[in-house]
């Protein structure tokens, strides 16, 4: 996928949360948005996790890959997780080989994320994030209302969920996790 194609994807869903230096109102989900935190999904260590465990938190859902030009974003994801987790924020990472850039096993992904980036946030087992085999979270995100819902077009697409698990913003892969246009939205939701 070209840089131009990435830059052109979904820019309308990425607006700043600050107006005149003050935090704006927290982003609201579009009409008809429902929680995507339903069902269960296996963590990278094989244990099943009820997705409702994350209800009540502001959540950033990200599809990841270990051999992608955006893989260094793991560092920024860990940084914002460390900065905001005590305020009710988490990152949920879903490694996927849908774009042919993920390591061959969950064990390899877990070791890579731990050793190279010190990842502490929840890391789920490798799974599909697009198409009919998409895991429950990404199937729900694909079905969410326009503006926030759509399957990822590349690795490191980010979906911001409110405390009710409803998607409120979608950020393209080229948006770094520590960019103000993302962190301001997190802060606005945490302050709500």
Image (cartoon, grey):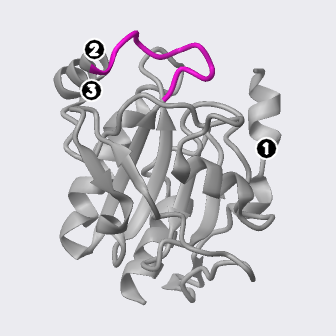
Q: Earlier in the sequence, mark 1 or mark 2?
A: 1
Residue pictured at 31% horizontal, 40% vertical? 123
Magenta residue span? 96-106
Q: Which residue position is annotated with label 3?
A: 113
Label 3 crowd (10 A; few <14 / some 14-19 / many >=20):
some
* Image coordinates for residue 14, horizontal then vertical, percent: 68, 61
Q: Which residue position is annotated with label 1?
A: 9
Image quadrant assignment for residue 141: bottom right
CA–CA distance in space, label 3 to label 1:
27 Å
Residue pictured at 48% horizontal, 31% vertical? 127
* Image coordinates for residue 4, horizontal then vertical, percent: 81, 29
Label 1 crowd (10 A; few <14 / some 14-19 / many >=20):
some
Q: Nearer the viewer, residue 16 or 67?
A: 67
Quadrant location of the C terminus in the rendered image: bottom left
Q: Secondary structure at mark 3?
A: helix
Q: Earlier in the sequence, mark 3 or mark 1?
A: 1
CA–CA distance in space, label 2 to label 3:
9 Å
Q: Nearer the viewer, residue 91 or 74?
A: 91
CA–CA distance in space, label 1 to label 2:
30 Å
Image quadrant assignment for residue 113: top left
Q: Nearer the viewer, residue 115 or 127?
A: 127
Which secondary structure dominates the residues rendered in magenta?
A: loop
Q: Secondary structure at mark 2?
A: helix
Q: Is residue 89 magenta?
A: no
Residue pictured at 49% horizontal, 45% vertical? 62
Return the mark for residue 108. Answer: 2
* Image coordinates for residue 45, horizontal then vertical, percent: 21, 32
Q: Would you say 40 lies left or right of 157 here?
A: left
Label 2 crowd (10 A; few <14 / some 14-19 / many >=20):
some
Quadrant location of the N terminus in the rendered image: top right
């Amino acid at each position: 996928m070209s840089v131009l194609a990435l830059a052109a994807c979904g820019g309308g869903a990425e607006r700043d949360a600050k107006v005149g230096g003050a935090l704006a109102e927290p982003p609201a989900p579009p009409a008809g948005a429902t929680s995507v935190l339903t069902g269960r999904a296996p963590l990278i260590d094989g244990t099943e996790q009820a997705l409702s465990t994350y209800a009540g938190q502001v959540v950033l859902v990200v599809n990841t890959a270990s051999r992608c030009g955006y893989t260094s974003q793991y560092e920024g994801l860990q940084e914002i997780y460390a900065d905001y987790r005590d305020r009710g924020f988490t990152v949920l990472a879903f490694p996927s080989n849908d774009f042919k850039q993920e390591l061959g096993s969950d064990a390899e992904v877990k070791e890579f994320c731990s050793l190279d980036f010190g990842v502490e946030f929840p890391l789920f087992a490798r799974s599909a994030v697009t198409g009919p085999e998409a895991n429950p979270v990404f199937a729900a995100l694909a079905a969410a209302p326009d503006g926030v819902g759509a399957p990822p077009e590349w690795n490191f697409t980010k979906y911001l969920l409110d405390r009710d698990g409803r998607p409120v913003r979608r950020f393209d892969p080229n948006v770094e996790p520590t960019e103000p246009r993302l962190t301001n939205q997190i802060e606005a939701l945490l302050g709500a």
